[in-house]
Image (cartoon, helix red, strand yellow):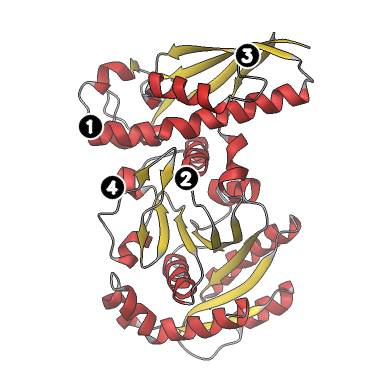
Amino acid sequence: MIREHGVDPRVSVIGKRLGKIKNIIAVVSGKGGVGKSLISTISALILSKNGYKTGLLDLDFHGPSCHIILGEEDLYPIEEKGIIPPETNRIKFMSIVFYARDEPIPLRGHEISNAIIELLAITRWGDLDFLVIDMPPGMGDQTLDVIRFFRDRKFLVVTTPSILAIQTARRLVKFLKQLNIDILGILENMRIKDNDNVNALSSEMNIKYLGYLPFKPEIESYIGYPNKILESEIGTQLTKILARVFSL
Amino acid sequence: MHEWSLAESVIETALSIVAKEQVKKVFSVKIKLGELQQIDVEVFELALKELSKGTLLENAKMEILSEEAVLKCRVCGYEWSFKSFLEKLDEEDSESIHFVPELVHVFAKCPKCGSKDFEIIKGRGVYIEGMEVEK
């Protein structure tokens, strides 16, 4: 008799579920409110528009918002030997919001981790060129689990030029570098005036400065309208940046 | 069905144990099913049977044991069974818990003090308890 004392079998299929994804991009930041969800969602829209099979995974369990940016509040996955993510704007999209709806999701650390394992074990992404992951801020459970379960993932760090955001971005980059994790580079968001803060951080940390997106309050009125977002100044700027980063 | 992906994870894990332990024959696999996940046992058994075909697990007995789900409030220490709460849940909410058991925190609260800060002390999901084998 082999006694396993409660082996969690779900972990064994995660590699298989993610096995046909060519590029995994985790969009991270040190602080909240720097625009990760918007950048993750627009990036997924741009990649899909360029003909790439794209997935978008919202792992920000305490504040899921990609569905709001996409204007999709009534999507629901199909159940077929697991979960098939619903499609919107030719993006396969997965979020805990499908099951929690608009209710608060009060989860502690190990519960977050357990919910991530469940989602990764049951979601059947199939063939994808890109999976973009919208992460919560910081180095908590989601970041540690993405490092643990996703092989060959690359991190895209987002920060505003604010000294406070840069300080936490530095800490996050240091942490990722300590683990030898691939960092695509750092993207400056919400630039109000010319400054060198983020560029200086990228030189200091020896990572690529990917470019900047301007602060445009009107983006708020485009939330829920993916085409308007893509046509906006932020959408066109990010398209240029991603074209350089991924040779689109 | 969602039961298939969980059954697949059980088979994959059991086969990796078989390979690691250099097992010749598997007599049985003991699987614990936590009540919280509300697994359809019939579908789960069918999936296990189908997925084990052509493997060392093909003729093994799949012993499925149900485990009561118990929740414990972190604030007042009160313990209660999920079953007593399940009857009050509508179909949509109970389906959400079926897919992601942690979402019980969205729909339940401590019956005594009303806190949503509680833990699942047993009966969460699917676990392999042990395997009877010949090496």
Which residue is the site of mark 2?
A123
Classify mark 4: residues with Cα within 10 Å, few (<14), some (14-19) or many (20+).
some
List the single residue furthest toward the front: B54
Q: Secondary structure at mark 4?
A: loop
Give the Cα distance between marks 2 and 4: 18 Å
Report the residue marked by disc 4.
A101
Q: Chain of mark 3?
A: B
Q: Residue A127 or A113: which is nearer the viewer? A: A127
Q: Mark 1 touching mark 2, by CB under 8 A?
A: no
The disc, 2 or 4, on the residue closer to the chain's N-terminal end is 4
Confirm whether circles 1 and 4 share one chain.
no
Residue at screen point 44% across, 76% down: A49
Could you tell me how far apart the alpha carbons at marks 2 and 3 are, in whole angstroms? 26 Å
Q: Residue at x 64, y 62 (%)?
A: A154
Amino acid at dot 2: Thr
Dot 2 falls on a residue whose secondary structure is loop
Q: Position of residue A155 (x, y in %)?
A: 62, 63
Callout 4: residue from which chain? Answer: A
Q: Is residue B60 visible?
A: yes
Secondary element at image label 3: strand
**Are dots 4 and 3 in contact, CB under 8 Å?**
no
The answer to whether the residue labelled 1 contacts the one labelled 4, judged by CB atoms less than 8 Å apart, is no
Q: Which residue corresponds to mark 3?
A: B130
The residue at which mark 1 appears reads as B91
Does A21 sit left or right of B78 as displayed? right
The amino acid type of the residue labelled 1 equals Glu
Q: Nearer the viewer, mark 4 or mark 3?
A: 3
